[in-house]
Image (tube, rainbow, N blue to C red):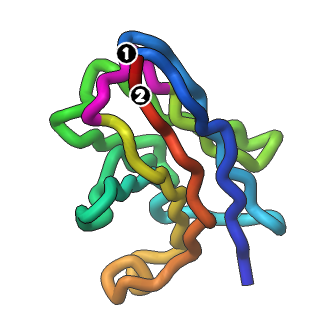
Amino acid sequence: QVQLVASGGGLVQPGGSLRLSCAPSESILSIYIMGWYRQAPGKLRDLVATLSGSGGTNYADSVKGRFTISRDNAKNTVSLQMNSLKPEDTAVYYCYAVTSLSDYLRGFGAWGQGTQVTVSS
């Protein structure tokens, strides 16, 4: 029963940078997909970036070239480096992880509690 804890959010000016981190409550031996999603006020939760167990990445068009997802296996964390932030990036960011394809297809997996990112001058 894995719990994810997200951190690193905050207030930043447009054009600034933030780095989000996600740490599991226990060791995860295998990962099918780990990623970051975000939810703006009044909006649905949308995909930001994902990282597969084999190293493949996928990014939303709106963040491609600005955000980078990575994993530190030694520290058991996944990070999201966010550069050139825009006001439109303001949202609560959630970490997600699932350990098998079957669970992923069924909508299962672990979610972090979310960390607030606010981009404003």
The x and y percentages for residue 101 are 40, 76
Q: Is residue 54 left or right of residue 105?
A: right
| Image quadrant containing the N terminus | bottom right
In the picture shown, does residue 117 fall above or below 110? above
Q: Most extreme residue toward the front, as rendered?
A: 121
At label 1, counting other C-alpha atoms closer than 10 Å, the crowd grade (few under 14, some 14-19, many 20 or more) is some
Q: At label 2, which amino acid type do we have?
A: Val
| Residue 78: quarter of image | top right
Point 57% across, 58% down: residue: 114
Q: Which residue is mark 1?
A: 14
- Magenta stretch holds residue 67: no
As displayed, is residue 18 above or below residue 50? above
Foreground residue among 62 and 39: 39
Which span of residues is magenta-colored?
Answer: 82-88
Q: Position of residue 49 (x, y in %)?
A: 36, 45
Secondary element at tag 1: loop
Q: CA distance from mark 2 to mark 1?
A: 6 Å
Establish if 17 lies above or below 62: above
Hey, which residue is sitting farthest left in the picture? 61
- For the point 30% across and 23% down, the residue is 86
Quickly name the residue at label 2. Answer: 119
Quadrant where the C terminus is found in the figure: top left
* SS label for mark 2: strand
- In the picture, measured across the screen, residue 102 lies left or right of residue 23, that is left
* Residue 65 image position (x, y, % from top left): 28, 19
